Amino acid sequence: MASGVALAVLIPLGVTAVGDGPPASAAFDPAAFDFWVDSAMGPIKSRILRAADGNTNRVVYVLDGQRAPETLNGWEIETNVPAVLASWNINVVMPVGGMSSFYADWNAPSSFFGVPPGSGSSVSGSGALNAFAAGPGKSYRYQWESFLTGNLREALRDRLGFSSIRNGVFGLSMGGSAALTLAAYYPQQFSFAGSYSGYLNISAPGMREAIRIAMLDAGGYNVDSMAPPWGPQWLRMDPFVFAPNLVRNGTRLWVAAASGLPTATDGPSFDTLNGMGLEALALANTRSFELRMATLGGGNAVYDYPAFGIHNWTNWQAEAYRMIPDLSANIG
């Protein structure tokens, strides 16, 4: 089913295969502050928003989508969700950057045909024209999983006093897949994980090539540098494959994908058409994941399938509002 949907998306539209919505326009929450942490990737910035009641036990990591910029996390740019989380007495951790990274530890820096990064010129925006430019994940190897579960986790504990256990994590699209990966392999750190419009069956026919196209469009990254095709490293990243871990861990999950039908606020445009196809692909992946979990006897997940919604921030913000009470009840 996923393969058929992927072809339906890719052939008539010629679009970004599995990315997120159009590039965001920057916003800034003055209540949040920059939190820099050294790592194997160099200094990495996160944005922190403290819980309204000042507690340090309730913490959630909020993951961006495929076009994650180096300035602010998309949730701060596009939504008021971080502020709402803080009002629920939850400390919000927003890692910044990681475009096309899937928040994974990559096999190698992104490159093509053995050409070292920096051989081309960086251009504004994202796209294949950046394929040979230097920059994040190209001048060095992405090691986001190690950062989120090691450097950042320890710095939050040691410098801010944040609890390093029973945290939450959620994200959209690329970040949704990554949230489930983190919960699957770090159950002590994450007691809750949420995936919105995630790609949860990435080993299905056609999905690797769909991701290849998306990563090329979102910053000019090479999927083969992330993980060799169909090997253990790739399968380790596939929620459909590691679903038994989530059942065994008993992690509370919130898994959502909309129908792909536009809402009244999604006007006629190429972005809307693109978002319809992308959400249909995410929906097929998510339904497959739900079936897989059911065959394993997993009763630890809430599934939400809104009747209207496409692959964009309007959909993801509304989904976050629905999820927050469940997140609040399952962390700390």
Image (cartoon, rainbow, N blue to C red):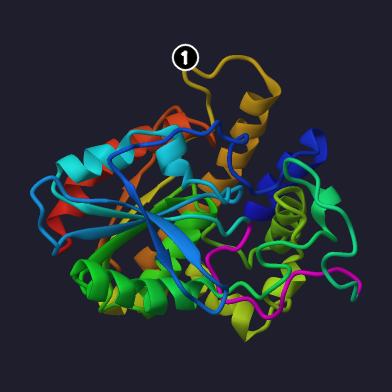
Q: Is residue 330 left or right of residue 102?
A: left
The stretch of residues the image draws in magenta is 100-113
Q: Quadrant of the C terminus?
A: bottom left
Q: Report x, y in % for residue 295.
A: 38, 69
Q: Is residue 16 magenta?
A: no
Q: Report x, y in % for residue 221.
A: 74, 60
Q: Amino acid at mark 1?
A: Ala
Instruction: Tell me where residue 279 sits by quadrant.
Output: top right
Does residue 315 appear anywhere in the picture? Answer: yes
The residue pinned by badge 1 equals 264
Q: Is residue 35 left or right of residue 42?
A: left
Q: Report x, y in % for residue 275.
A: 60, 33
| Image: 248 above or below 148 | below
Instruction: Tell me where residue 29 sits by quadrant.
Output: top left
Does residue 297 appear anywhere in the picture? Answer: no
| Image: 107 above or below 71 | below
Mark 1, Cα crowd under 10 Å, few <14 / some 14-19 / many 20+, is few
